[in-house]
């Protein structure tokens, strides 16, 4: 037991003055954190505040440079995720950590496989367990389908399901779990979270969606620039208090005059009867039409599988087989390739940033330059233009 430390009965895990240093930055600066038993512990802060880094320490993914952690009055040290799991700690990552070449039930039971005898995998038990947990999540899937063929939101549900099949789960860390989920799926997830806390399981919930925090959270801890700022029970605070603590009250954010007569603003983009055929018949996008004004932010909503991503993929040239008309500033485009659309001034931030938006083996400079390679002789971008 650490000198001077006395365990509180309502605390499952205590992190004491945790610091983490990366080359060029101090991600965590002597942060202390209490993980309350059977509660939804919300961890919040702006990007770069240190939320995910702190959770990686608790989950055994990384180790702190300084500080200690206690479960009860016992000091603990997790050299890896296996050590953390032995203490009942699981994590749902912000970036998916699935195996795209394996199927649904194989991913759900990865590293927690059931066996018949000492060697043979009990895939019957795997399938039964996977089916049960997906039914609990109200999200049935083909258990034999490879995960790489699924949409990001479906993969997110598998990531959640992986942790719900744990027999000895005591802490579940959820890092932006709703970022790819529909409203109905979020509702189901919150119901399960309440079931878990009612059973005594502690949850750490990281989210930027303040309305979710007020709905599901029990206790809030706020970080800013790698440091602890404040904490409070949710029942005693409001959204304005959270924003003030996150920003230090020193930041102001730009606003835009919403009194715009959009009927007088010219179109920059017109989409007419956009269709994308589905294999086996029917449409992924079915005769969709809309207009986009100059300076306008147009929101496109729909449940998972409604065709939202496919619309943007068509406009970006990923599906040259689409039909219908796309006009830019009144000129019809014959969209056949991604390069063509880049040249036309289009850009796409994909749904799966990790898999589709980046080449993770390349550095930041090269990733920023990828879309411009074809503009230069032999694909070489001058360093002064690539940010080097």
Image (cartoon, rainbow, N blue to C red):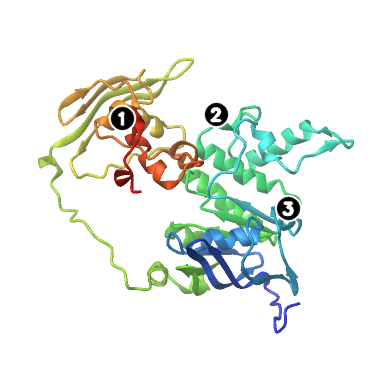
- Badge number at residue 377: 1
Does the CB distance between marks 2 and 3 fall below 8 Å?
no
Does the CB distance between marks 1 and 2 fall below 8 Å?
no
Q: Which of marks 2 and 3 is in front?
A: 3
In the picture provided, is 116 more to the left or to the right than 128?
A: right
Q: Nearer the viewer, mark 1 or mark 2?
A: 1
Count how many numbered circles sit on residues in the image: 3
Q: What element carries label 1?
A: helix
Q: Residues within 10 Å of mark 1 (few under 14, many from 20)?
A: few
Task: Residue 127: give x, y in percent of width and height.
Answer: 72, 33
* Farthest left residue in view: 264
Q: Could you tell me which residue is drawn at 33 percent across and 44 percent down?
A: 383
Q: What element carries label 3?
A: helix
- Badge number at residue 149: 2
Q: How crowded is mark 2: few (under 14 residues within 10 Å), some or many (20 or more)?
A: few
Q: Could you tell me which residue is drawn at 69 percent across and 62 percent down?
A: 200
Q: Earlier in the sequence, mark 1 or mark 2?
A: 2
Q: Earlier in the sequence, mark 2 or mark 3?
A: 3
Depicted 333 relative to depicted 49: above or below: above
In the picture provided, is 145 more to the left or to the right than 235?
A: right
Depicted 59 relative to depicted 133: above or below: below
Q: Could you tell me how far apart the alpha carbons at marks 2 and 3 are, in whole angstroms?
A: 28 Å
- Badge number at residue 82: 3
Q: Could you tell me how far apart the alpha carbons at marks 1 and 2 are, in whole angstroms?
A: 36 Å
Q: Earlier in the sequence, mark 3 or mark 1?
A: 3
Task: Residue 358: give x, y in percent of width and height.
Answer: 45, 40
């Amino acid at each position: 037991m650490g000198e001077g430390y006395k365990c509180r009965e309502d605390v499952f895990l205590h992190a004491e003055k945790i610091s983490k240093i990366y080359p060029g930055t101090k991600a965590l600066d002597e942060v202390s954190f209490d993980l309350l038993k059977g509660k939804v512990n919300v961890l919040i802060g702006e990007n770069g505040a240190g939320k995910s880094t702190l959770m990686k320490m608790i989950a055994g993914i990384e180790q702190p440079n300084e500080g200690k952690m206690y479960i009860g009055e016992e000091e603990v040290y997790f050299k890896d995720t296996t050590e953390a799991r032995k203490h009942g700690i699981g994590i749902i990552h912000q970036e998916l950590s699935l195996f795209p070449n394996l199927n649904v039930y194989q991913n759900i039971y990865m590293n927690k496989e059931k066996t018949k005898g000492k060697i043979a995998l009990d895939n019957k038990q795997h399938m039964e367990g996977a089916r049960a947990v997906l039914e609990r999540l109200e999200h049935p899937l083909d258990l034999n389908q490879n995960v790489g063929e699924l949409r990001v939101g479906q993969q997110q549900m598998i990531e959640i399901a992986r942790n719900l099949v744990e027999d000895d789960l005591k802490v579940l860390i959820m890092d932006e779990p709703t970022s790819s989920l529909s409203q109905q799926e979020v509702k189901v997830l919150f119901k399960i979270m309440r079931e878990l806390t009612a059973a005594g399981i502690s949850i750490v919930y990281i989210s930027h969606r303040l309305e979710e925090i007020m709905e599901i959270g029990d206790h809030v801890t706020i970080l800013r620039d790698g440091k602890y700022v404040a904490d409070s029970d949710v029942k005693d605070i409001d959204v304005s208090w959270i924003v003030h603590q996150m920003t230090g009250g020193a930041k102001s954010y730009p606003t835009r005059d919403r009194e715009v007569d959009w009927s007088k603003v010219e179109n920059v983009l017109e989409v007419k009867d956009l269709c994308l055929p589905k294999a086996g018949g029917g449409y992924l996008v079915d005769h969709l039409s809309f207009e986009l004004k100059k300076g306008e932010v147009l929101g496109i909503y729909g449940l998972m599988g409604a065709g939202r991503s496919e619309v943007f993929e068509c406009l970006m040239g990923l599906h040259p087989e689409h039909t219908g008309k796309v006009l830019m500033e009144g000129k019809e485009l014959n969209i056949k390739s991604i390069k063509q659309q880049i040249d036309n001034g289009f850009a796409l931030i994909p749904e799966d940033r990790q898999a589709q938006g980046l080449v993770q083996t390349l550095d930041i400079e090269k990733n920023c330059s990828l879309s411009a390679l074809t503009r230069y002789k032999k694909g070489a971008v001058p360093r002064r233009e690539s940010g080097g």
